Image (cartoon, rainbow, N blue to C red):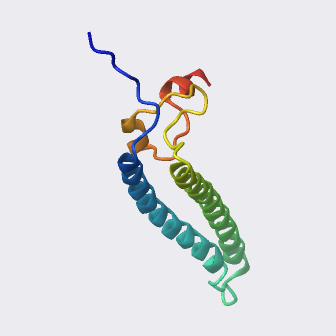
């Protein structure tokens, strides 16, 4: 009878694969974050000096909503970037892919879908 040893960490080769995936996602996330920041900066650029007062009030309300929307998107994107950067640190420390609750290896499929995951589905469902 063969003794199957449960894997406790990903190999260096596997970690490099995950690193490549995370770096790609990080590049896209930073690009999106930059876009949101630019939208926040240009939200006031459209002047309404030559328009009627009632339209100006509507326009200002719209600009405020847009700014709020882009601010939320930028904030969410910043958090995502932080999670991806932390995942890169875990790769360097060779602790990447280990569930912080159970200590077991998070399945590869889950990490491919959510590369910054720190919990296995088992631990996530217990929350």
**Badge count:** 0
Q: Residue furthest bottom?
A: 50
Q: Quadrant of residue 85?
A: bottom right
Q: Quadrant of residue 39?
A: bottom right
* Nearest the eye: 105 or 85: 105
Q: Is residue 91 above or below residue 1?
A: below
Q: In this view, does 115 lie above or below 72?
A: above
| For residue 59, side relative to residue 27 (left or right) | right
* Nearest the eye: 69 or 30: 30
Quadrant, the N terminus: top left
Q: Is residue 122 above or below residue 15?
A: above
The percent coordinates of residue 18 (x first, y second) are 41, 50
The percent coordinates of residue 120 (x first, y second) are 50, 30
| For residue 6, side relative to residue 47 (left or right) | left
Q: In this view, does 96 lie above or below 85?
A: above
Which residue is found at the position 61% from the left and 80% from the top?
42
Which residue is found at the position 62% from the left and 25% from the top?
127
The percent coordinates of residue 105 (x first, y second) are 47, 31
* Nearest the eye: 84 or 67: 84
Q: Residue furthest top?
A: 1
Q: Quadrant of residue 51?
A: bottom right
Which residue is found at the position 41% from the left and 61% from the top?
24
The percent coordinates of residue 117 (x first, y second) are 52, 41
Which residue is found at the position 70% from the left and 89% from the top?
49
């Amino acid at each position: 009878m063969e003794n199957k040893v449960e894997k406790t960490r990903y190999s260096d080769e596997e970690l490099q694969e995950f690193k490549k995936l995370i770096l790609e996602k990080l590049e896209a996330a930073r690009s999106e974050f930059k876009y949101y920041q630019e939208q926040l900066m240009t939200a006031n650029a459209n002047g309404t000096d030559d328009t009627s007062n009632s339209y100006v009030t509507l326009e200002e309300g719209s600009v405020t909503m847009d700014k709020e929307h882009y601010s939320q998107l930028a904030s969410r994107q910043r958090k995502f970037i932080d999670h991806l950067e932390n995942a890169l640190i875990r790769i360097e420390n060779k602790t990447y892919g280990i569930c912080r609750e159970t200590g077991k290896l998070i399945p590869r499929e889950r990490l491919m879908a959510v590369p910054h995951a720190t919990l296995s589905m088992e631990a996530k469902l217990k929350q």
